[in-house]
Image: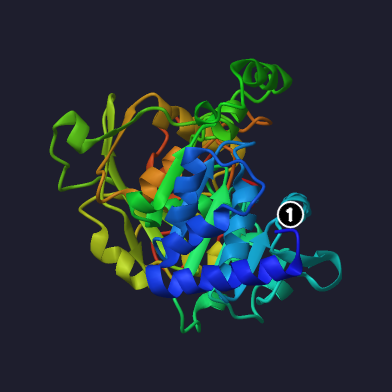
Amino acid sequence: MKTLVSVRSVTKKIRLLYLKEGIHTALDYYLNFLPFPLDEFQLKDLHLAVSYPEVAWIRTRRGGKSRDLTIIAVFLAILEYKVIWRAPFSDQIKQAVLYFQHNPFVKKIAVYSRSEVDIFFSPSLEVGGMTVGKTASLGCDCLIYDEGGKVEKDKLMYQNYLYSRAMIAASTREKFIIHGTTPAIYTAIEETVEALPAECVSTHPYTDCHWIPDAFIEDEALKHANDPWYIDQEYRCMFIVRGGAFFTNIKTYQELGIEAPTEWDHMGVDFNGIGHMLVRIRYDDKYIYCGPDLVVQEIAQIKQYIQGKMHVEVEEGGANMGYVNQCDFPYEYQRVVDQWSSTRCAELCKRTIVVDERLNQGLIKNLREAIHNPLKEGIPKKRDDQHYLDGLMHAIHPWQPKVKTYKRPTIQINNVGNFGSL
């Protein structure tokens, strides 16, 4: 691979093998000309990447993710697939550039001038960040995502990630989407892994990498003594709750071997433009029994789910008041402020929260993702997407409330004063 002639001849051979014997034979031939030492699991991952329309490599830090993504990107470009590479931060792109430099099929790296890596006798790779301008205008046959575990779902970058997937839609060839990342919950990669079949996901913790000794992990743990979840996530490849799970008292009806109730005596309503989440429960000293996840689009629909003398609480304040003024059923309304939340969280935590593993997927997800608030003891760290958890907080009426509540029984009552300070 020292001359242009040999690059041309090898490129032709790779394409010929692809046409005659298939993509896996072509890949093996291509790999023989690379200067990178490959472990067995890395070879398997490279073949996995071209076996399915979408795959995810969940790997430890220092597991060779970026290097192997550059390898497969160049290979697909040699087969004349149009390849686009996206990474959330510039550090990932810098790391990829280092590996592109050592690939003998790379002609020129122009990432910082025109966002491209030129491949000899092949289409160029388009390499860039997860910005708005880089996620909508281009089309491709292969999308490569480097470190999707760094794309948090409550950030603008997550929306860019979602939009970027459309770039592959118009391809008339085989489509490939390839992810290489460390894991993290509440991110693009968690959502991706949940949606993929098990055979499309490979997971390799540091114990699969002989070049990462235990002594190094011990040293990393000492350096991150204030973040005990760092090693589990970054090196053991565990999808864990960073910050520590707030709710560790969750059981399913299936685990406990009990039937779910058919009647509920409390309902919490979380208003949203995307739909209003209703959380129905009944509870005693030991258990909080949760009804199936429920979302309605119209305020008028809520009334049909109120049973008997069910206590219903909705959230007041701000934009919610537009919804509150449409309620035509008996309810209490309250803004769940911090001191009020701590009372409610105490009620939730001192009982077992019982959910259905099939019918409470939204609530279970919200509960599992709730972490401790490092600034405010006794309440979870607030996130904007935990609508079922918010509904549960309204449903668990405090036994000894510390603030006054107000009743607004019908829509005809309009002038009730300002309760925003509750």
Is 406 left or right of 118, judged from the image as shown? Answer: left
Residue 303's image quarter? bottom left
Measuring from the top left, give residue 240's x and y in whole percent.
50, 35
Looking at this view, is 290 or 103 the one in front? 103
Up-down: is 105 above or below 365? below
Up-down: is 381 above or below 51? above
Specify few, some or many for label 1: CA neighbours under 10 Å numbering under 14, 14-19, or 20 or more: some
User: Where, quadrant-wise, is the C terminus in this rendering?
Assistant: top right
Residue lying at 26% horizontally and 48% vertically, measured from the top left: 291
The answer to whether any part of residue 387 appears in the image is: no
Looking at this view, is 333 or 98 the one in front? 98
User: Where, quadrant-wise, is the N terminus in this rendering?
Assistant: bottom right
* Tag 1 residue: 89
What's the residue type where badge 1 is placed? Phe
Measuring from the top left, give residue 113's x and y in whole percent.
86, 70
Way the structure is coloured:
rainbow
Is 241 left or right of 420, judged from the image as shown? Answer: left
Residue 107's image quarter? bottom right
Residue lying at 39% horizontally and 68% vertically, measured from the top left: 21
Up-down: is 269 above or below 166? above
Is 419 left or right of 255, judged from the image as shown? Answer: right
Up-down: is 267 above or below 346? below
Secondary structure under tag 1 reads loop
Is 94 left or right of 81, judged from the image as shown? Answer: right
Residue lying at 14% horizontally and 34% vertically, measured from the top left: 258
Measuring from the top left, give residue 46's x and y in whole percent.
50, 53
Residue 377's image quarter? top right
The image shows a total of numbered marks equal to 1
